[in-house]
Amino acid sequence: NPVKDELFIETEMNVEEVSIYTVTGTLIYKEVDFNSNTIDVSEFRGGVYVMKVRTENGEVVKRFVKK
C-alpha cells in the first residue's frame, strides 16, 4: 500500500469472490471464482478504495490507496 498498477492478494484460503468499492460505496470491480493473486488496477483513478474478499471462512474488508 499504496498500489500503482497491480493489487496483490496473499492468502492461503480459497478466495470465492473479490469486490472493490469507492469510498462512497460504488462497486467498480467484482470477480467471482477468483483464481489469481493479482488485480489490474491501472485504470483506476488515484484515491482510496475498499476491497472485500470472500473466502470459505467469511469476509475480510481492507482499504487500499491507488497512486
Image: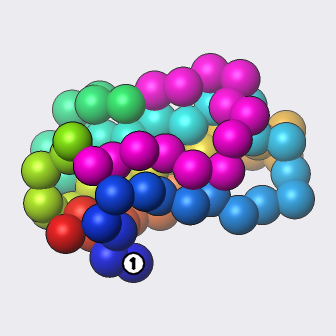
Q: Label 1: few (<14), some or many (≥20) within 10 Å?
A: few
Q: Residue furthest bottom?
A: 1
For the point 28% across and 31% down, the residue is: 28
Magenta residues, start to end? 30-42
Quadrant of res 35: top right
Look at mark 1 in the image and give the residue it sits on. 1
Residue 57 at x, y percent in the picture: 84, 46
Residue 60 vs 4, above or below: the answer is above
Q: Secondary structure at mark 1?
A: loop
Q: Is residue 8 left or right of residue 15?
A: left
Magenta stretch holds residue 28:
no
Question: On the rendered image, what quadrant is the N terminus found in?
Answer: bottom left
Question: On the rendered image, what quadrant is the C terminus found in?
Answer: bottom left
For the point 86% across and 51% down, the residue is: 13
For the point 20% across and 46% down, the residue is: 44
Quadrant of res 58: top right
Q: Amino acid at mark 1?
A: Asn
Magenta stretch holds residue 36:
yes
Please tell me how many numbered marks the rendered image carries: 1
